[in-house]
Amino acid sequence: MTAQVGPETRVAVIGLGYVGLPLAVVLARHFDTVGFDINQSRVDELKQGHDRTDEVTEEALKASTLKLTTNVEECRGADIFIVTVPTPVDNSNTPDLRPVISACRSVGSVLTAGAGAIVVFESTVYPGVTEDLCGPELERVSGLKRGVDFFLGYSPERINPGDREHTVDRITKVISGENPEVLEVLAELYGRVTTGGVFRAKSIKAAEAAKVIENAQRDINIAFINEVAMIFQKIGLSAYDVLEAAGTKWNFLKFSPGLVGGHCIGVDPYYLSFRAQELGHDPKVILAGRQINDGMGRYIADCISERTAPNGRILVLGLTFKENVPDLRNSKVVDVIRGLEANGHTVKVHDPLADGDEAHEEYGVSLLSSKADIGLDGTPAEEPYDAIVAAVPHQIYAEMTGTQIAALIKQGGLVADIKGMWRATELPEHVSRWQL
């Protein structure tokens, strides 16, 4: 007999990152909810009301009834476990399932015989992981029988970091369960927390597959735009000028060129291609898109170097994987930085949202930290740069004036505007401009 959803339902969220924390806070509005994470400093910060991912406000955290812990024993007796740990790739772009297997071991250690608990996975995986890998691991650790003592479900996460419109309490949640009864329990659970409703997938594997193709599709579309941007560069055209014209057609898909990093679009296609290759299929389109997008950082660095004085001083604005978020995971700006350094340039990096310690630990990048470092306090640069690279369109950069930008650059210097955020900004004649 599976657990049911009611006034006494207890939910445990395993993993309190950019996916798990917002979900746990929303669940806590309706259910007795405990959030578990293995990172003690993360839990300590959350207890103080600080979310370093900037997905949940201090006010919302302090007002929440969510219980926070690093002791998995405090999750014992939960009716529903929701696993939201990361699923990255390793240095060879092979799926790294160690975090999700570790989460299975934690959950398995506190599953109770006869309780009928449901274990739901939200982590992005290739089709088959939930039933073929996670289920057996839960059985092994718990000594219990799947389908009798506990049950499996899958509901892919759809959080878009920094997106204040498509939040977890507004989006349509895809749900799946190993049997119809589990499916309806999850429909009731997730239906309570989102106004976007639920979609019942035909199977767990179908739900897993839906998640990986959502991001693989975006990756391929962006790869096409990146490739045509390279072609247009040879013609002397800006891709943004071309896209602006093409975008007037009603069915033109509006994607823009640039760096494709982060923990979804830059990772998920490798999960799908890995499974395809296991099955003996060569995923040509998927891997071609990945090859183009993974090479964009070095391509951009080479384009900038061709237009910049040899051994120049270059200021890179932005390090996070996308605008207006502090998330540094799988940032492709690092590829631009390393490419510029490989071409002999000295590179300085500024990002108002990124954590300096994390940037240094993860990438060996030391961040400039103050507004004075980029002239936003009104003081000119002590030593102007040969080039400025607008890598991430954080709002603070988008609002810079032409005068502020020009004050940082030498006579004849270059403004490399990767995302086209300064297309409408007038720059003095002594400054040259480049964009994709």
Image (cartoon, rainbow, N blue to C red):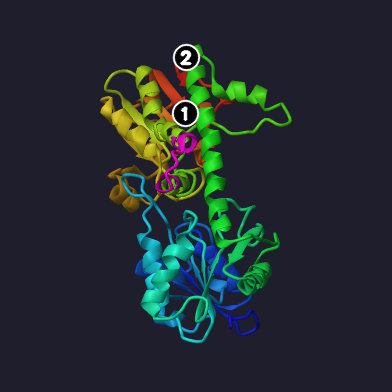
Q: Residue furthest front?
A: 280
Q: Residue furthest bottom?
A: 114
At 60% from the left and 21% from the top, the residue drawn is 241
Vertical placement of residue 419 versus 42, above or below: above
Depth check: 209 or 434 in front? 209
Vertical placement of residue 322 versus 181, above or below: above
Depth check: 231 or 348 in front? 231
At 40% from the left and 68% from the top, the residue drawn is 103
Q: Which label number is shown at residue 234?
A: 2
Query: In the image, 410: left or right of 227?
Result: left
Q: Residue 435: x and y, percent?
A: 49, 24
Could you tell me how far apart the alpha carbons at marks 2 and 1 are, in whole angstroms? 27 Å
Dot 2 lies on which element? helix
Residues packed near mark 2 inside 10 Å, few (<14), some (14 to 19) or many (20 plus)? few
Which residue bears the numbered disc 1? 405
Q: Is residue 382 magenta?
A: no
Query: In the image, 300: left or right of 168?
Result: left
Sequence-wise first label, 2 or 1: 2
Q: Quadrant of residue 196?
A: bottom right
Dot 1 lies on which element? helix
Q: Residue furthest right?
A: 250
Q: Residue 377: x and y, percent?
A: 45, 39
Depth check: 283 or 111 in front? 283
Residue 71 in sight here = no
Which contiguous range is marked in magenta?
Answer: 276-287
Q: Is residue 278 magenta?
A: yes
Please tell me whether mark 2 or mark 1 is closer to you in this view: 2
Vertical placement of residue 259 versus 159, above or below: above
Q: Residue 51: x and y, percent?
A: 47, 62
Q: Tag 2: residue type?
A: Lys
